[in-house]
Amino acid sequence: MKHRRSVGEHAFDWANTLVLALLGLLAVYPFLYVLSISLSTAAEAQSHSLHLYPRRVSWNAYRIVFESPDILRSLWNSIVRTALGTVITVLATCVAAYPLARKELPHRSLILFLILLTMIFSGGIVPGYLLVRSLGMINTIWALVIPGALSAFNVIVVKNFFQQIPESLLEAARVEGAGEWRILFRFFIPLSKPVLATIALWTAVSHWNQWFDAMLYITDDRKQVLQNMLQRIVIENSTRLIDMGKNTHDVASYTPETVKAATVVITVLPMLILYPFVQRYFAKGIMIGGVKE
Amino acid sequence: MTKGETSFVLGIVFIIGVGIALVPTAPPNSLPKPPKVDWSRVVDNPAKKLSISWCGSPAFPSAQPGTWVQRNLERAFNVDFKPLFIDWASYGNRMPLMYAGGDVPDVNWDGDPTQVRRNVRQGYVLELPYETILRYAPTYVRYLNRYGREAWLFSSVNGHNYGVPTFAASDVFPSAPIWRMDWLRKAGFTRPPETLEEMHRALRFFRNGDPDGDGQKDTYGMCPDVYWSVWFGEVFAAFGILQQDFMVKDGKVVWGGVQPEAKRALTVLRQWYREGLIDPDFAAASEGNSPQDSKFNSGRTGYMYAYGSFSDFDKSNPNAREATMRILLPGAELAAGKPLIGLDGERRARVWGGPGHVIWFGKDVAKSPEKAIRVLKMFERFATDREMFLHSRVGQRGVEWDWNPDRGIVLLPPFDARGQDMRSLLSTNIESAYGFFSPCAIPLSETQEFLRQGEAAFRHQYEDPAWGVKNAIGKSDVVPSSASYLKDLRQLQSTTFIQIITGDKPLNAFDGFVKEWYRRGGEILTREANEIASEAKEIYSKVGAR
Amino acid sequence: MIAQYRRHRDLCSMIVPVLAFFLIFCYGPMVGLMLAFKEYSLSRGMFHSPWVGFANFTRLFGSPDFPLAVRNTVVISALRLVFGFFAPIILALLLNECRVTWFRRGIQTLTYLPYFFSWVVLGGIFLMILGGDGPLNSLIQSLGHSPISFLSNPVWFIVVLIVTGVWQGLGYAAVIYLAALAGIDGNLYEAASLDGASRWNLVRSITMPSLSPTVVVLLILSLGNVLNAGFDQIYNMYNPVVYSVSDIVDTYVLRRMIDMDFGLATAAGLFKSVVSLLLVVAANSIARRATHGEQGVW
């Protein structure tokens, strides 16, 4: 049926489109800005403008960043950390969520309560460090992927999704004689792709962006991750080291701003590449997870 | 949850609560004493190989164990170093955790007296009497006394000494302000301003005279560096004070920022701000995001303060500030200036003045105290054996570095690659206090040996140590209560000063600030600073410092 | 009882390692919460340090900075709630009303992009954009106004915190509402418009009511978060001039830890946890009462 639109509705549609377009622009502008600065020459980066695009492209800033010898290694460390951490988290979350989704589990609500409580209470930085240390994980990748492998939030989200899977399917599987492990891996996990993709994405994003734990647990430069390494490059380039006296600055042919911008671009690039592949799962996943038990 | 489960949870909570309420409590501050060593009985046998874990200055984060510098020292002193490389950014957060985990390296580096006191209080720092240091490293102590005797205050806690202070020979020189000479010439100057009045005139032209000739009023006079030690330091110094330091006035130690002179300096700055001479961005700066350099480099301001040195004007270095500026801003010409002549006719500039940091020994050294002796012997050797010292800083001449009369100490390939110096534990700045294994440095001027062409003249003209004014007690956080008050008071002061300068607050807000400063802990700090100052005399006499 | 475990052997075998994980990595460190009641000495260790009862808490509330940090935290959270909570709902409604599918998809994709970046990165970007030489101030100046100190004026800084915070979470939060909107039966709209209802009427009488359950749940969740004012964001954006308005509980805890005043740091953290717990429980029971037991997080 054709809906006849009034003048007012037409006006609204136009206004709406305009507002949305503006919002879209606002959302990407900061990234355009850093991209443009990172590719600018020193003189241009310092000029007053909106910097939507570089007028003359210069790769100097990127050269500076990649000349730093540890950058590629830390990039690799970050990739490994993200991949390993994501796989561990997704698998562990499934194993944790499945029994909790089943009403037959003894003490189910007590266990749920105990898990929920960890969302609010934590021991703090020092006891956490002491634990990681006593497990011998300092300076290993395990310090970055194990302590946070399971989060109450992820477990609840996946549990809620599992609960929406029809009971009849469970019965059918059971008639076939499948055990719980088999039911989980053969039926539940394949049926839960959207939510698992979402969890995977959340985890990957947070692993990629995490720097605080690496700062605490990784002292060996060869094991350091990208975020921390870039932070250091930014600090070394843009500030004299406090107290170090006057001989530390080395005024070179790039500006600290362009280097800073280039490091930012390098950090966000992998996320941008990953983004189109996962985003169709993403929207679905949030709606499943975010709403309600 | 079922009823049983709920009561289980509540029961646990109840037991914990009762436990906390009933457990006997000890009075606070009942902390343990650090381990003691009878140093007079310790014998160090040089033939015995010692294994020493070493957490040195955080200036070499990307180094790895096994550099030539390390191996060479290991051979010379018959030790096995286990170095631990930490970076500045994580130093504050990570070290407390390491110590909390019981990992206290044999040798530790602390930049600030606050950290030393904190660590001493926690009971894992070894006491090290003056006699021991004097006995094994007399020449080192002589240098220390000459350049940075205040550092002895950093290692002294409650009348005991807890480590070896270090010194920074380069910090006795005030640094030169840098001016845009081409702009100054347009304003009719033939040399950089030397008084407050001249400076005012120059800045006014920078703002209003369109010095960059683009027809737009887009330049400012100045934008100060954010760090408190240099923030508007030239103006405060012209009024005879160091705004964020303890200084001596009428025989008493006082805080510079609450003196009437500070108010007079603020009056001037407030006027300058109103005239638009100060870039408004100065107020938004934070550490790590200081605008002074970028403003100056981009030609938005014509003056910068406190980081100028001979290197900036080094004609032979294509990366020197002056050369870079010529490329960035065609026509730009830089000139070094001298510190301003104050209202009383004295030329003055704030300097750190030489006291460096503290190297202390961890509790485990008590088990084999000869480690500390070996380290002291090593420091003594650095002070007496120039070649050994250079080896510890820049490696071997002809391999890692060579001397160039124009450029000074230059690293040779492959060590000159970006970041390679840091990874190889090398630093061409041999005057600084930041060697990893060698914390002291003999100033170049003492031998003239490594001064570049023109460097001695530059220092003589622009960086005369006689102009330097330093904190009366080395660093303000020497006072015991600084941990509780100093940071907040610094913040209160910088916030208030910024608000007064920008006109957000009236000038007489200063008087209220002074009262609040004293009330919020300033009184305690001042009293303790005076106590330290009188205690200092005693310490200096014990170590033979004049 | 034991029979019950045996019957669900597989389920138990799954849950045991999970429980072990939470026990070790979440409840294990919680033992450290006892430091809140101790005078912690490193050389004595956690267990042998002397108990001091509630001395740390007395000290905490006796100092000027902790109450200030609590106040700042609550103020920032409240502002986030007031301005940030409804923004994504509005965005979702606008997107829902947009009829050009590719455009709607495109905008939606763009608006949740910022969610993917850490505050280390975003903080760096905003410091550049909002600085005096940054593009925003260039724009303001070219319009003939004097530049604004976004980062050093305490009021502006709070505005910046709130706006950039909303900006980052906007698209992401809108997705949740869009999902709820997508679940509305299309026949409802059809029937109503046959009856001659205007588009505004449709929004008001069909769209909004179907959103309300989602809104209630999310509101409760954010109430429980009142003491989380956004550590990552603030830590990466603040500077000394605005400490007085932006020092929050989390930054306070970190600072005390660096001072190695572990007792005080732990006490502050524990205080935050307990208050958060009470808030969540209270919010949940309010929601249940308001909706006659239908709504609530649990």
Image: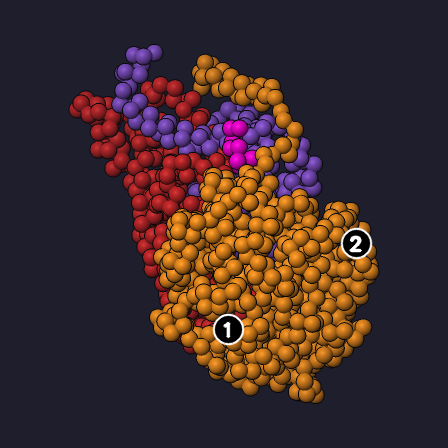
Chain colours: A red, B orange, C purple
Q: Amino acid at mark 1?
A: Val
Range drawn in magenta: C41-48
Q: Residue at the location (42% across, 45% down)?
A: A217
- Could you tell me residue B261's position as x and y percent? 80, 64
Instruction: Report whether residue B66 is seen.
Output: yes
Q: Is residue C26 above or below residue B531?
A: above
Q: Is residue C46 magenta?
A: yes
Of residues C86 and C225, the one nearer the viewer is C225
Q: Which mark is residue B514?
A: 2
Of residues C215 and B50, the one nearer the viewer is B50
**Circle 2: element type:** helix
**Circle 1: element type:** loop
**For mark 1, what is the residue?**
A251
Report the chain holding disc 2.
B
Q: Residue at the location (32% across, 55% down)?
A: A76
Whether residues under marks 2 and 1 lie with C-beta atoms below 8 angstroms apart, the answer is no
Q: Is residue C55 above or below residue B215?
A: above
Left or right for B78, reference B385: left
Q: Amino acid at mark 2?
A: Val
Report the chain holding disc 1.
A
